[in-house]
Image (spheres, rainbow, N blue to C red):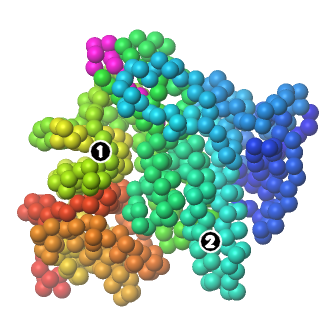
Amino acid sequence: MSEIGLVFRGIGLVLRDQFRILVVSKDGTQLLNSISLGIIRHTSIPFRNRFKVQKTTQESHDFKDSNVNPSEIFRYNEAQTHTSPEINERTDLNRSDSAETAQVESISDEVITENPQEMPSNRSTEEATLFKQEEIIEKWKYNERKVPSSAISRAFGFGTLGLRMAFGVASESARNLFPNESSNIENRSSALNSYISKKESADQIVSTLSRMRGAALKVGQMLSIQDETLLPPALSQALERVRHNADIMPNTQLEFMMKSELGSDWKQNFKQFNNVPIAAASIGQVHKAILTDGTVVAVKVQYPGVAQSIQSDIKSLRRLIKYSGMLPKSAYVEQALAYAEFELGRECQYKLEANNQKKLKKLLEDEGAMIVVPDVIESLSTDRVLTTEWASGKHVDEFSNPERNSQEVRNQIAETVLRLTMRELFEFKFMQTDPNFSNFLYDKDTNRMSLLDFGAAREYASEFVSNYFNMVNSCAERDREGVIYYSQQLGFLTGEESLTMLDAHVSASFIVGEPFSKEFSEGYDFKKQQISTRTAAFGSTLMKLRLCPPPQEVYSLHRRLSGAYLLCVKLGATLTCRPILEQYRSTLTTYTPLQTLK
């Protein structure tokens, strides 16, 4: 028995002065040693065998504060040969999905290869005939790869991504060295932008996010809901794939989850169940099925281990952001990630999502057939499986082509989403905060919009909603003092900001409030006005000079609001928005004249 280790001071700490990591490639394995100040020395090791986990105690999962001997964790098994350099990712799921108690039989099953190949599928070809072909995932778009469910395998994935990014940024940075510290910071930022602008780099990032799923993919999907002018084209195109489709889990894991949640005889509940999912997202994948009574349903199945991995994933993301220099300290990453951890924990509770779905369905009853929330099939829903009525339609962003969709149709879709967003906030004080365009399906034939995915729905306090409405109203009226006053009430400002900071804050706020202003009472062309580009001009000043993080409510709220705006941009919508805001003025406004504020 010879021994080899993955040696970190914390397996997620990707940029230490000295560390080692195994990088599995197509030709073999290289052990990278002493990566320090950009100097890389490596030793080649033949890739023949698998690594078996000998310890699965809590201590062996938490490397950060322990002195675990790596040789006690991973052993190189000479007796068991594995002649193929390809990673076998189709082993049976023979362990609990809990990261703390998982008995990991083979680390190679969950190692991320540098160039992962699409794995051959064991799906039955007969399954594709159950439903219309256009409703089935085109398999060539997907990798069927096992969900990494242990703490070790997930940390390894983040570590590999961190290494790739570190090496890529270092290479870009070396091409343009600056003599002083401030210039080096500028160079590092420029190098990062240059790195992620390359198609190969963007594809690597997206491939890892799709493979990991969970918190990592959720962040990628959030990034995909951005104005296409603000992201490098290569990264934007790669993230577009992430937004719609992640990797799918193999049948072994699907069967394990269904048996765990609905019992060993779970198939008896269905007349037909398509093992090929119709969508794959960050936390679970969705299958189309037909119940024994003929009801067509959507069955959302959570990935094994995702709920248990949230905390460790967020830690890994925190380290990745910190050591890659992606974001400055003034971005208040800690607060954002803390809220992301809280929100993702809620999204993994499908019973909570079912309650959110039923609540919003009741609130929207007066919309009639225009806006539909599918019914929940409670008898086939648990904390990790959610079964609902089937909803038909296309993702709302698929109607952006002006040659195939009239201006009227595009305007109607955009106005429906924007009006719904305002109603959820200002009337219901209860909002579905995930703006992913895939959560809004529009049926052109019936003029009906169906709403999906309520895991991120949340309530807002009446006082917050009232103050927020008055701030939006101040933005629309271009009232500087009103914007500053209500920004302080909400917690955006402390009252100690510099004049430069206040000017930038107010200017950006006026731009965001433009669609609701009197100036555009005849219609606002969202694409022409370039809201994102113009507000981004103040981003650097706001990031450098702000004195406090934003209130926790707006992490989710602004995600939904920006998603609604960006949909309007993507559809090329021209809307009369002021009446949408006006209808809430009488019930929410506590707006006081400028003289009273003074």
Residue lying at 58% horizontally and 42% vertically, measured from the top left:
211
Q: Quadrant of residue 451?
A: top left
**Span highlighted in magenta in the image:** 284-295
Residue 292 painted magenta: yes
Residue 491, relative to residue 145: is it above or below?
below
Residue lying at 32% horizontally and 48% vertically, measured from the top left:
398
Q: Name the kind of residue labelled 2 in the image.
A: Ala
Element carrying mark 2: helix
Quarter of the image with the C terminus is bottom left
Q: Which mark is residue 440?
A: 1
Q: Residues within 10 Å of mark 1 (few under 14, many from 20)?
A: many
Q: Is residue 91 left or right of residue 346?
A: right
Query: What residue sits right under mark 2 in the picture?
Result: 191
Q: Is residue 455 left or right of residue 283?
A: left
Q: Quadrant of residue 470?
A: bottom left
Q: Residues within 10 Å of mark 2 (few under 14, many from 20)?
A: many
**Nearer the observer, 154 or 199:** 199
Q: Position of residue 445 (x, y in %)?
A: 19, 38
